[in-house]
Amino acid sequence: MASHAISRIGAGLALVAWAAAASAADLKAGRTLYDQHRCARCHAINDQGGKTGPDLSRIGALRDREWLIRFLKQPKSVIADAKMMPVRASDAELAALADYLASLKP
Amino acid sequence: MKRRTLWMIIAALCSALELVWGLQPPPAEAIPAWARQYNADCGLCHYPAVPRLNAMGYRFRWAGFRMPEELGQEPDVTAVGNYLSARGRGRYVYADSDQTETVSEFQWHDTTLFYAGAITPHLSAFNELEWEAEDDVSLVAQLQWLSGRPERFTTVRAGQFHTLPRVGVGPLDRPTGISTPSIFSERLTTSPVPFRLSDDQRGIEVAHIMRTSRLALQVTNGLDASGSGTAGDQDTAKDVLLVYERLLDEAASGLTLLGYRGVWHDGLTDDDYTFYRYGGAVNKVFPGGFDVLGGYVRSQDDLPSVAGPNLQAQAFFVELQQYLRRPDIIVLGRYDWIEPDRDTARDRRQRQTLGIVKAVERYLRLALEGQRSTDRAAATGYALTAEAMVNF
């Protein structure tokens, strides 16, 4: 009985570790996309980057993942007078970028 | 009959505009180079329509076609698409006056190639090759060196360039409509001096930028006997332009004060003319898209004794614009007034301009302008110009 419980806890921990690892990988992929698309030309994170667009240091506390994906796909569909053009990337890449941005919280 | 033809043409143009309004094309992939570079909408740097700039656009131009905070950063010069752009302008022109033949023709105004942007952390280049009607080719080629911090830096610009009109702020930027205010684009006195403030010239400029202000000093060749500023120098004297510019808000409001001293050599009589232009221009964009623009230039031409007494002249313009968000159009009206010789009566020139501008997506701009010109000494003229401008 005790060994059964221990194995269940072990499996649960392994699942959490796997999920955390996957999440970390997604965030890393999102950060890579952020660099590849040169978002820092216009946006700053923790004082690193341009000032043309809004500071993204706290964007994760202000917008959720779904909102960010919609914005990245078609900015004017979310903010009518947005000055940014759609980010040209696959749905999976946009999701990874949105995951990264959503993780930016104080 | 003539008038009926004109109204038919106006009706046809209005129908064409209506057609374009109704058939909004899908978003274009092709956008000008710097918008591509920053993945940005035209509205990031332009207001109320391309090519006129807003405060962001002015700062971008002052910093050598980069954002000021990018000063000192290595640009990616291998991305050719971020530097290369093209423009084409086609027009229909109808003009009628008491003294000239009636004109009614379609024109291809120009095809222009741009290759411009930041090329090193402290150096920028701007090259513009414009093929105009009748095979005229004009070139703007300049190098700009920059040094300092984003909020305070110095630039040195050298080459063959637009001196102030078309690269200034507010009324001295490129016009919202088709035509440029007369005080910048026309000769302001009746002397033989062929000078216009809008003439391109060869020379050097030193400027200092402090956040929202720019102080610049230009030394240029001046104009040759034919009136060209890009065909060499006929004398050793240089022209000097001193300019102060200030951005008044984040929209597109700006103030400019200018003083110009030039020397023009008349090759026929071997006489030198010294001339001066002093003035300023200002505009204010109000909430709701209402824009008031104005400018004044006072002129003095010191003539050689054989040519008569010195000339004094003055000129001004006032322009009102309204940006209408819902149909996304700009309507404008301008009044130009030139008194080319204060000592001569009945020589004033006036012009009234009405226009409408419509941006279609990101690459096409349509504009329609009607003008009535009166010259007390000569004639009254009417002109109608419709223009399609494409940038990509």
Image (cartoon, coloured by chain):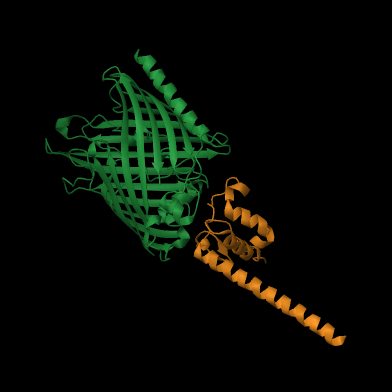
Chain colours: A orange, B green
Q: Position of residue A102 (x, y in %)?
A: 65, 63
- Up-down relation of residue B289 to residue B233 (above or below): above
The image quadrant that residue B327 belongs to is top right
The image quadrant that residue B350 belongs to is top left
Q: Position of residue B105 (x, y in %)?
A: 31, 26
- Up-down relation of residue B218 to residue B327 (above or below): below
* Number of marks drawn: 0
Say whether residue B176 is visible. no
Q: Residue furthest right?
A: A1
- From the viewer's perspective, is A44 left or right of B259? right
Say whether residue B237 is visible. yes
Q: Residue furthest top?
A: B1
Q: Nearer the viewer, residue A93 or B179?
A: A93
Q: Position of residue B220 (x, y in %)?
A: 26, 49
- From the viewer's perspective, is B260 left or right of A2? left
Q: Nearer the viewer, residue B71 or B138?
A: B138
Q: Residue furthest left?
A: B269
- From the viewer's perspective, is B88 left or right of B231? right
Q: Position of residue B108 (x, y in %)?
A: 31, 35
Q: Which residue shows up at 29% across the image and 37% down it?
A: B196
- Up-down relation of residue A4 to residue B222 (above or below): below
Q: Which residue shows up at 43% across the image and 44% down it?
A: B169
Q: Which residue shows up at 51% across the image and 34% down it?
A: B23
Q: Which residue shows up at 35% across the image and 12% down it?
A: B1
